[in-house]
């Protein structure tokens, strides 16, 4: 039964691949992950809570977006240009969303969240522009969130253990903000516990969906 | 038996314990210092009657442009003496985790707030209760977590041990025993990850009853001398399950994956047999193969630490007994060739290098009860420059004269890594 689930995921992956022709190519995974359900995802930490803003600027507690479904949450800032950083999450989240939506087993159990850690620049309007058509509804919701201020953001960053450093540099008389961080994407179970933290070395639709399947098999 | 006799004849034995530097950090640490480092942090064993006698983290200025170049900037004592040994950086490089082999304590130092002035912010003391393991050795950053390889256990203090996983906040998550079946001896030492291949490699040393024992006694105890690790293990990293045990005789210690993109091999040195081993995927399966000899094994040189260059084409090897630093050409990793040697101390243990390979740092201490005695018991950090041909002395800090202790593991630091 477990292997059937993994095989179905693999098939979904292959079936979806040609649709990606217009999107950045995601390199194939260089190993065969263990079959879903044959391994344990540890309880790493409890996902934090705090006030966030949706695309309309409406405040809500973050837990509204990290409970009841399996959540894949990426912390980003919209002006990041590091190819191994924030921009990397978009095509991968696209692939996760598409494959999860194509799977009757997954589609009702998964959501995606993109949360900015640059409230100064990433207003709800900026997040809307960043999200584009991705913000439209669908069987697998994808929420784009920001915060009101650095103060509102701080407990979320601390809770996730996300290191963000903001430097203000002056170039030719103009002030420029530079942000350095380590890319982290969090897999959160329906109870709000972080069960995996991906960095750029192994963030891949196959690894994430395999882990999602593993969490589903815990039930 | 011959080996035991040789060890006995040698009079002193040093089997090091290590895991170093900028080219050898966890692949999950992205903030590598690729320019000039400003600091070397030295995790230092306390010595009774020397200073406060406690283990401490010593910060040394290593920027040649600084007025205090080659000087001690400060030290942070942990207030106890627990056989300080190794340390590791968290994935965000804001903290150093450091521990001692004599106790199950892990000390966490904040190096992000002010890299010039590390601060002790937490001591994790539940490893023995939660995991049953003793002697935390390797601290290996995973995203948001720290995987700690222990050397021993609290039941019999032998070499059968395991790994403990903690969150970056210091909360225990899980433990993983080293395999004792399918050829596994249950021993542990170092660990190293290749995330692109989902592989974790581990190596094996010995337990508390051996590493805390006076060396003179130990080498005369035939039964005790049998209790050294002879294996490496390839694990499925995601599942944290052992996949294959390799027979690697003679205490394989530090493990270094080649940092070069596209390379998928690791190298290690077996201390007691003085051999280099290559771990590589072949025909769809990971294999371990003896690929070279370090000095003359009959003379028991005891390779104790290795440091790989960032292009994977060179390897520094420190041999404790003859106080020699050696360079191996790794252009052909299955046929390493020694191309340079230099005596760098009466006893040498750890070797670390800067990312560009131009600066090499060496420390002296192995274990409190295994270091040499008398005039041979030098305790130092020595900095060298390397131009590809010659190691040239640049500075030295005398840890005895400075009343610091026995200089052991090193990590590099930089002012630019200050947290906001």
Image: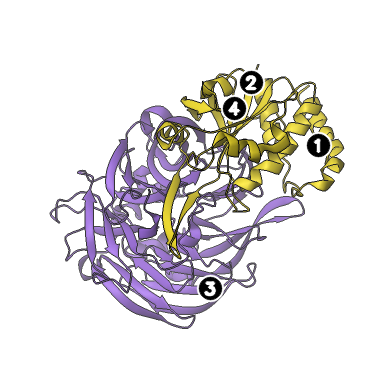
Given this view, does label 1 or label 4 mark the residue nearer the observer?
Answer: 4
Which chain is indicated by disc 2? A
Seen in the picture, residue B396 relative to A208 is either above or below; the reply is below
Given this view, does label 2 or label 4 mark the residue nearer the observer?
Answer: 4
Give the labeled residue for mark 1. A13
User: The residue tagged with tag 4: helix, strand or loop?
Assistant: loop
Give the labeled residue for mark 2. A69
x and y percentages locating residue B384 in the rendered image: 37, 75
Mark closest to the chain's N terminus, 2 or 1: 1
Task: Kindly report the distance in space between the C-alpha atoms of the residues bearing marks 2 and 3.
Answer: 53 Å
Q: Colour of chain A?
A: yellow
Which chain is indicated by disc 3? B
Mark 4 and mark 2 in contact (Cβ < 8 Å)? no
Given this view, does label 1 or label 3 mark the residue nearer the observer?
Answer: 1
The residue carrying pointer 2 sits among few (fewer than 14), some (14 to 19) or many (20 or more) residues within 10 Å by Cα, namely: some
Q: Residue at x 26, y 57 (%)?
A: B58
């Amino acid at each position: 039964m477990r292997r059937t689930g993994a095989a179905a995921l693999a098939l979904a992956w292959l079936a979806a691949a040609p649709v990606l022709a217009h999107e950045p190519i995601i390199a194939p995974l260089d190993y065969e992950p263990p079959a879903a359900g044959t391994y344990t995802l540890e309880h790493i930490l409890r996902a934090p809570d705090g006030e966030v803003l949706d695309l309309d600027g409406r405040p809500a507690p973050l837990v509204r977006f990290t409970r009841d479904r399996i959540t894949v949450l990426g912390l980003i800032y919209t002006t990041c240009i590091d190819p191994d950083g924030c921009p990397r999450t978009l095509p991968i989240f696209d692939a996760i969303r598409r494959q999860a939506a194509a799977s009757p087993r997954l589609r009702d159990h998964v959501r995606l969240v993109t949360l900015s850690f640059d409230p100064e620049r990433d207003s709800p309007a900026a997040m809307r522009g960043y999200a584009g058509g991705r913000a439209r509804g669908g069987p697998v919701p994808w929420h784009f969130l920001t915060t009101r201020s650095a103060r509102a953001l701080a407990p979320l960053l601390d809770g996730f253990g996300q290191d963000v450093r903001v430097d203000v540099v002056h170039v030719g008389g103009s002030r420029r903000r530079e942000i350095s961080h380590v890319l982290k994407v969090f897999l959160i179970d329906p109870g709000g516990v972080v069960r995996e933290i991906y960095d750029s070395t192994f963030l891949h639709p196959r690894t994430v969906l395999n882990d999602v399947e593993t969490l589903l098999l815990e039930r | 038996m011959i080996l035991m006799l040789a060890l006995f004849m040698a009079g002193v034995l040093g089997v090091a314990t290590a895991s170093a530097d900028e080219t050898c950090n966890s692949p999950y640490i992205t903030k590598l210092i690729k320019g000039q480092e400003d600091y070397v942090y030295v995790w230092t064993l306390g010595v009774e009657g020397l200073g406060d006698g406690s283990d401490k983290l010593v910060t040394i200025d290593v920027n040649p442009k600084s007025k205090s170049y080659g000087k001690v900037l400060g030290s942070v004592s942990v207030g106890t003496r627990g056989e300080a040994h190794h340390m590791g950086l968290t994935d965000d490089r804001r903290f150093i985790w450091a521990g001692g082999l004599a106790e199950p304590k892990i000390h966490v130092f904040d190096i992000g707030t002010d890299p010039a002035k590390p601060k002790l912010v937490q001591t994790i003391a539940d490893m023995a209760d939660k995991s049953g393991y003793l002697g935390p050795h390797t601290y290996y950053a995973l995203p948001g977590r720290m995987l700690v390889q222990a050397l021993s256990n609290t039941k019999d203090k032998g070499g059968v041990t395991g790994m403990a996983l903690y969150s970056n906040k210091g909360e225990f998550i899980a433990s993983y025993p080293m395999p004792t079946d399918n050829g596994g001896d249950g021993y542990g030492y170092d660990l190293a990850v290749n995330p692109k291949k989902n592989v974790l490699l581990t190596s094996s040393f010995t337990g508390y009853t051996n590493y805390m024992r006076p060396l003179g006694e130990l080498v005369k105890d035939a039964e005790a001398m049998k209790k050294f690790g002879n294996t490496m293990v390839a694990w499925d990293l995601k599942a944290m399950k052992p996949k294959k045990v390799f027979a690697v005789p003679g205490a394989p210690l530090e493990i270094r994956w080649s940092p070069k993109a596209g390379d998928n091999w690791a190298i290690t040195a077996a201390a007691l047999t003085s051999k280099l081993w290559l771990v590589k995927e072949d025909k769809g399966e990971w294999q371990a193969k003896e690929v070279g000899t370090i000095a003359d094994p009959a003379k028991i040189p005891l390779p104790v630490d290795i440091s790989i260059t960032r292009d994977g084409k060179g390897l520094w090897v420190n041999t404790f007994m003859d106080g020699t630093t050696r360079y191996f050409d790794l252009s052909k990793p299955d046929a390493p060739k020694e191309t340079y040697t230099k005596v760098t101390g009466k006893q040498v243990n750890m070797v670390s290098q800067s990312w560009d390979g131009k600066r090499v740092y060496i420390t002296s201490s192995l274990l409190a009860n295994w270091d040499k005695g008398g005039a041979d018991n030098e305790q130092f950090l020595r900095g060298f420059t390397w131009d590809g041909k010659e190691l040239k002395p640049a500075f030295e800090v005398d840890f005895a004269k400075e009343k610091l202790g026995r200089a052991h593991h090193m990590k590099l630091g930089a002012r630019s890594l200050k947290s906001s």
